[in-house]
């Protein structure tokens, strides 16, 4: 029996149509727009001004708080401006605009293909290097990685779990890097295990990626401490809490942190970035982005410099087809619909998905038939039908808190599965935000 | 290029809809309907057609002219009610009987509560019980229906459960009543008599397997009901086999299978969590056996389900699913 998480989950069509497209280096761009809000937490503070010359990998912004991060120039050239620019949702965010001139890298970056396996650094040095390289969680949440590698003093890490599940339909960037860079990923894992002081590592991969499993298993022969765990295909297995449950059979208690189970989860993409940062001195300046959709003539997995406009990527990929109805940053279950195609990519962008109006059309809503399919699908063991009812009644915050609306991970299984087409997650998301605001406003004990 | 749509996730949807679920239920009921028509002839077919038509029409008229709300008969839920009601009547019942039953089922049990998803009681069962108390003679006479294709000999007389009840009331013991004609195999393929849907256990079980495969229902409720009936009637039977019918007879007689598989699993009127469903199933099983053994009616499944329907809101309130990360105290 292959492992999987124990509560809820759904089986969307995996639609991995771009899985066979090898990673291509995206052509040079003319202008890069580097966002200062590339990580969870406080936006970084720019340290360059218009007119400054920058090289690839040069620091252009510094962290402005504990949970924040460094940002590096993904290109070489001249800073044109520092100022607000619209992100994918249309919100104005501080960006550094750089006019590209050539491709001149910082001298200390090792650009060779040689794989460096020895890890001569202490845990403190590793964490410092990861922090200086501006690495954030590439699975989507973009939480600064160095913070996760240094758990609070009273918590003890016991194992590292690398997340190679890629449970969202359509996404294939993690699949590709696991096929093409298995050794680097595992060295990255070994580096993080050293930083955490743990001796046990796992790589969780869903069964629908046999080539990635084979390549990782082959490479893992040289890493006796790291085990490749093949997981059943089930969404949302890539959720941090679900993955810990699937791999080590422990559930994060409500309100607690994943580290309370002894597990630290890092995406395989993050692991690759950690390898490059620690062994090659290369900061996080590019990432692999899947450009996919059934309406696109060709599927791509591009290695793209951060700060490339989405419209540019789509243009190079063959243009936006006439029948496109919705363009999503990320997968169809948890991705965000792009309102502004001129927005530039950030570190955690993993995919651009183009759907036709038919593929993404919402069902007309009809009466709840109390089938309880939403409750069976909820991976957190909540009752979406009830949360929906309470949310619509309005003002029932105490009841919503009692029903643990704050535990919702917004995976979308409830809305996906509802035969009556009720937008359950829309309702729950709204009331969750209200309840969390009330909870945060309470004096801490 | 079109204007791009911007809306919150998820951006995709599963294939199931209310209509597809109801269609699956109709498909699952097909073997039982076929057996009913083969065994009882045209009258059973007329009953099904009239029942479905009357239920759909009642819902249509109420939504269109009385409530003036969008008409939702296309979701097929009214058709399911019609089929279930037809399978709950004697196959030779007159057509107007099912029309009355349909009007009560849809008009009173379903639409007055707000339509699909809002009703407390299973509409088809409300229709059936209304007819049972209003037209007791028509509802319990299983006179010569005649076989459509001559596969089965014509039935007449009471149902097995009715015969048992009547015999016991007259002071007979079970061995005197049953003689040798209530054999297991007979029950399993063609019941010796009964309402349309009670005729063949195998047809109902086929439907059950289909519903399980299509993940329309879970096995929890039917299995709990059947186990409870088997165990409780088993205890009574072991204590006094001359006055209490044996557990296998209880499982395959009357409307137990039809009720357990198709009526107790109605989404709207059954609990939403596994624990709630188990309590619900045990309740139905207990009440069924008690009505059969001690009640004045020979059959108790309808009453058992309707009584347990009342408990559903309470079961939903107190039986919560296992939350992620919850530690059992």
Image (tube, coloured by chain):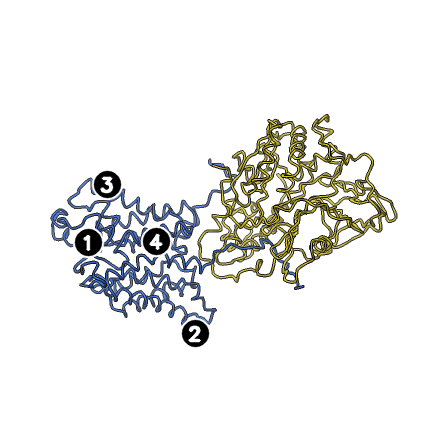
Chain colours: A yellow, B blue
On the image, numbered disc 1 is attached to which residue? B160
Indicate the chain on which mark 2 is placed: B
On the image, numbered disc 3 is attached to which residue? B235
Looking at the figure, which quarter contains the N terminus of chain B? bottom right
**Are labels 4 and 3 on one chain?**
yes
Of the residues tagged 1 and 3, which is closer to the observer? Answer: 1
CB under 8 Å between discs 4 and 3: no
Closer to the camera, A167 or A7? A167
On the image, numbered disc 4 is attached to which residue? B207
Where residue B90 sits, quadrant-wise, is bottom left
Which residue lies most toward the bottom here?
B65
Of the residues tagged 4 and 2, which is closer to the observer? Answer: 4
On the image, numbered disc 2 is attached to which residue? B65
Q: Residue B43, image x and y in percent?
A: 25, 66
Q: Residue at x 63, y 62 (%)?
A: A323
Q: Is residue B96 above or below residue A198?
A: below
Label 4 element class: helix
Q: Earlier in the sequence, mark 4 or mark 3?
A: 4
Of the residues tagged 4 and 1, which is closer to the observer? Answer: 4
Q: Residue B320, image x and y in percent?
A: 45, 45
Label 2 element class: helix
Indicate the chain on which mark 3 is placed: B
Indicate the chain on which mark 1 is placed: B
Of the residues tagged 4 and 3, which is closer to the observer? Answer: 4
Separation of residues labelled 4 and 2 (CA atoms): 36 Å
Where residue A370 sits, quadrant-wise, is bottom left
CB under 8 Å between discs 2 and 3: no
């Amino acid at each position: 029996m292959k492992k999987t998480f124990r509560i809820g989950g759904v089986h969307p069509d995996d639609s991995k149509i771009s899985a066979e497209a090898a990673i291509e280096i995206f052509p040079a761009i003319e202008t890069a727009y580097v966002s200062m809000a590339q990580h969870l937490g406080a936006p970084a503070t720019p340290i360059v001004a218009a007119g400054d010359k920058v090289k690839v990998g040069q620091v252009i912004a510094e962290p402005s708080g504990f949970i924040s991060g460094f940002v590096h120039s993904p290109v070489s050239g001249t800073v044109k401006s520092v100022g607000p620019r619209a992100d994918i949702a249309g919100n104005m965010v501080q960006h550094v605009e750089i006019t590209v001139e050539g491709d001149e890298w910082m001298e200390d970056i090792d650009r060779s293909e040689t794989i460096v396996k020895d890890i001569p650094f202490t845990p403190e040095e590793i964490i410092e290097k990861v922090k200086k390289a501006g690495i954030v969680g590439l699975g989507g949440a973009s939480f600064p990685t160095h913070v996760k590698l240094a758990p609070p003093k009273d918590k003890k890490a016991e194992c590292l779990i690398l997340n190679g599940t890629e449970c969202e339909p359509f996404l294939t960037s993690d699949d590709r890097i696991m096929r093409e860079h298995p050794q680097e990923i595992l060295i990255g894992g070994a580096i993080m295990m050293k930083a955490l002081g743990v001796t046990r590592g796992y790589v969780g991969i869903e069964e629908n990626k046999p080539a990635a499993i084979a390549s990782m298993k082959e490479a893992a022969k040289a890493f006796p401490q790291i085990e490749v765990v093949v997981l059943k295909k089930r969404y949302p297995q890539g959720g941090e809490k679900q993955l810990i449950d699937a791999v080590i059979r422990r559930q994060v208690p409500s309100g607690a942190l994943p580290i309370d189970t002894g597990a630290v989860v890092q995406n395989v993409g993050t692991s690759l970035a950690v390898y490059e940062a620690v062994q090659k001195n290369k900061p996080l300046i590019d990432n692999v982005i899947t450009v996919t959709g059934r309406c696109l003539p060709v599927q791509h997995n591009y290695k793209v410099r951060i700060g490339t406009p989405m419209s540019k990527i789509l243009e190079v990929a063959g243009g936006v087809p006439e029948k496109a109805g919705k363009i999503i940053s990320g997968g169809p279950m948890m991705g965000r619909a792009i309102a502004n195609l001129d927005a530039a990519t950030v570190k955690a962008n993993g995919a651009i998905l183009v759907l036709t109006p038919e593929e993404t059309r919402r069902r007309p809503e009809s009466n709840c038939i109390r089938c309880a399919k939403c409750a069976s699908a909820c991976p957190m063991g909540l009752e979406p039908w009830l949360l929906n009812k309470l949310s619509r009644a309005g003002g029932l915050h105490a009841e919503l808190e009692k029903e643990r609306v704050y535990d919702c991970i917004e995976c979308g299984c409830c809305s996906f599965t509802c035969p009556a087409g009720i937008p359950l997650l829309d309702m729950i998301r709204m009331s969750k935000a209200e309840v969390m605001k009330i909870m945060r406003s309470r004096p801490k004990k | 290029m079109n204007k791009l749509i911007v809306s919150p996730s998820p951006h995709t949807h599963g294939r199931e809809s209310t209509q597809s679920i109801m269609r699956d239920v109709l498909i699952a009921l097909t073997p039982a309907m076929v057996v009913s028509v083969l065994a009882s002839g045209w009258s059973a077919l007329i009953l099904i057609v009239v029942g479905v038509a009357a239920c759909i029409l009642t819902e249509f008229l109420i939504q269109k002219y009385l409530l003036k709300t969008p008409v939702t008969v296309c979701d097929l839920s009214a058709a399911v009610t019609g089929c279930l009601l037809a399978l709950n009547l004697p196959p030779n019942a007159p057509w107007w009987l099912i029309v009355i039953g349909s009007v009560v089922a849809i008009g009173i049990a379903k639409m007055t509560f707000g339509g699909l998803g809002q009703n407390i009681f299973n509409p088809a069962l409300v229709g059936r019980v209304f007819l049972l108390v209003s037209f007791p003679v028509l509802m319990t006479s299983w006179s010569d229906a005649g076989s459509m294709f001559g596969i089965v000999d014509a039935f007449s007389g009471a149902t097995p459960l009715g015969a048992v009840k009547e015999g016991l009331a007259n002071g007979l013991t079970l061995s005197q009543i049953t003689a040798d004609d209530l054999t297991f195999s007979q029950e399993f393929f063609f019941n010796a008599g009964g309402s349309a849907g009670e005729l063949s256990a195998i047809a109902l079980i086929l439907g059950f397997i289909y519903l399980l495969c299509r993940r329309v229902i879970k096995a929890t409720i039917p299995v709990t009901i059947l186990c409870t009936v088997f165990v409780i009637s088993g205890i009574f039977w072991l204590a006094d086999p001359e006055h209490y019918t044996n557990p296998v007879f209880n499982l395959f007689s009357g409307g137990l299978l039809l009720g357990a598989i198709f009526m107790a699993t109605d989404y709207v009127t059954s609990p939403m969590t596994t624990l709630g469903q188990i309590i619900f199933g045990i309740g139905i099983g207990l009440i069924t056996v008690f009505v059969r053994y001690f009640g004045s009616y020979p059959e108790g499944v309808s009453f058992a389900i309707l009584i347990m329907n009342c408990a559903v809101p309470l079961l939903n309130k107190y039986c919560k699913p296992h939350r992620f990360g919850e530690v059992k105290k």
